[in-house]
Amino acid sequence: MNTVPYPLMTLNRLGRFAIARSRLLGRYALFFLRSFLLMFSWPLQVNKILQQVYFIGMKSVSVICLTAVSIGMVLGLHGYYTLVKFGSEGVLGAAVALTLIRELGPVLTAIMLIGRAGSAMAAELGIMRISEQIDALETMDIDPIRFLVSPKLAATLISMPLLTAMADVVGIIGGYLTGVLMLGISSGIYFSRVESSIQMADVMGGFIKSVVFAVIIITVCCFKGFHTHEGPEFGAKGVSLSTTSAVVIASVLVLITNYVLTSLLL
Amino acid sequence: MTTPFIQFEGVSKAFNGNTVLRGIDLAIYQGEITTIIGKSGGGKSVLLKHIIGLLEPDAGRIMIDGQCLTDVKGRARKNMRRRFSYMFQDSALFDSMTVYENIALPLQERGRLKPVEVKARVHARMRDLDLGAIDNDYPSQLSGGMKKRVALARALVTDPEAVLFDEPTTGLDPVRKNSVHNMIAEYQQRLGFTAVLISHEIPDVFYFSQRIAMLHEGHIIYAGTPNELQRISDPVVHEFIQGFENPAGDSSDTIQDGSWKSHFNAEMARMQRHHVPFALVVLSIENLSEMLSSRDAADPGVAQRFADRVRLQLRITDTCTLIGPNAVLLLLPFTSLSQAKMVCAKLGRALKGQEIMHVQECQGTCMAISAGFAEVERNGHPERTLAQALAQKEIFYQFSVC
């Protein structure tokens, strides 16, 4: 009997893996493209988009504010004790603002949104898939991507930059609470440093990141939920698995993309 | 013969190496109710999903109105799909939408009707299906039967040419089952759509289907009218149908005393639901002890063989129960008293004494079989009906055992 040499077998496996991943990537890209293009198909789903803006944006405000203020306060605290060693505590406002606007604002908002809205979307679509609701849409000649995914994508593209901007402002206020109110830096110096250090490019960079993260969150979470039936598990276990993997993959992708974007934008 | 509306030609489908459909050939005709029966997990839903394009065949083709489904693309495919509606096994209602929104969804999304017209059509369907003031209820607030009716309303609201029903009565009580079956039959007659139905409700399917197809191990082993199915001799079909008729699993098709009462009650419920008659007949070998004087008079084998011979002459949905050493009881669904007498006349012509008796020593003896008939009344009691049949017993058949 002819046996395949070990290196060839390994190559074979690698090839299969690469093809499977490429196919998955292709399907993911098509999923995103379809959901993006169908956002503009007539009639526009304004009501559904507004409902999703409320769910994704409005309902995330409190949790994002809480996270941003605590991160801002920690930044203020750490920044102050580091800068005071060099006698530069006056630039605390600049340090807090730049860190938040360039990096932490978009990343934290994205991570919080994955936890709050992304997981819910993956679970919702997963349940709809296993209970044949998505099939039912197809039998009614309703495009499930247009009906279910496009409004979520549009709503996240609207909400995410606004939430990021809000997280930046609240984070700067958090830094103010520790730096100015607790540790005694002048309020005028804090805000003047904030104002003088931030360039439009920083704000635009944060904005670009938030838009890219919005696309990643929605497409990954919806893609995983939408294809729950193709996973290794079925039923409730399948939904739980697709939700977990959606959250993990989206979080990791956000962090990796953040690095790539930072290096490109600098 | 008219051209089929839907035609499967050598359709095969496998999932992860597990072949579910093996070269299916099936014709479904316009304006008819075609019911697909078969064991659970045998691929009936898979078959149905191919019609609406939810699944693509691995081999073979599906013709819709003479057009190959896989060849139709784009707008034409969309238009073809709009000719169908699908009612899912678990209803597949949208949990986050109200009943009204669920039913109105296909109309709203097609965007051809004004909101007022959508409202009128939705409410008309809701009235038809006895869905009272539940517009604003959510599916989670409804009972199983209500959910089914909402799903049916959603399937019918677009006035489709064909409706595919995937086990529409699963999990419903007998009254609701009857209501769903009546609804399907009534709407099918009124609107003239083609219905393809997966059902396990045997023998109810004989009552409302124009055609029945049986799927077994990936093949269509029978397709034809209910009347033809009643007379079919294929043992697999018999086993399947009798599996429903005979829960005890007696392969001889002869159920033992005691269980006939549950069959009687099931037939009674069916009679009340569909307003169809059913007959009870008691057949007895009157002079069995005399004939077996040289043997053990209580030989149970004779009655069993007698029952087996009778069974061979009955329809697939009839049941035959041994109720004594020399008597069998027949329950004949969808059969009036006069029809039951005709069945017995046919039996008389077909029965052969030698095979029943397995005896040679009582040559020249005349064997007498009597038949007692009872008209089963609404709310009739099994014991009382049996007593009535026994009281009206008369010899209907005599022959020599040689």
Image (tube, coloured by chain):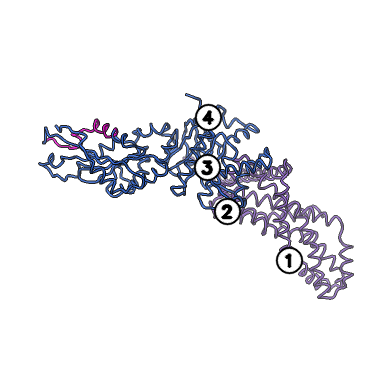
Chain colours: A purple, B blue
How many residues crowd mark 3 within 10 Å: few (<14), some (14–19), many (20+)? few
Mark 2–mark 3 Cα distance, whole angstroms, equals 39 Å
> Label 2 belongs to which residue?
A239
Q: Is residue B170 magenta?
A: no
Is A153 located above or below residue B198 in the figure?
below
Q: Amino acid at mark 2?
A: Val
Is A78 located above or below residue B142 in the figure?
below
- Residue B43 at least partly seen: no
SS state under label 1:
helix
Question: Front-most of A30 and B119?
Answer: B119
Q: Amino acid at mark 3?
A: Val
Looking at the picture, do discs 4 and 2 lie on one chain?
no
Mark found first going from the N terminus, 2 or 3: 3
Q: Amino acid at mark 1?
A: Leu
Mark 1–mark 3 Cα distance, whole angstroms, equals 59 Å
Mark found first going from the N terminus, 2 or 1: 1
> Label 4 belongs to which residue?
B5
Residue A4 bears which disc, if any? 3
Q: Which residues are magenta?
A: B342-360
Instruction: Please identify the quarter of the rendering in which residue B393 is found.
Output: top left
Q: Amino acid at mark 4?
A: Phe
Which residue in the rendered view is the most extreme toward the top? B1
Quadrant in which the C terminus of chain A appears: bottom right
Q: Chain of mark 4?
A: B
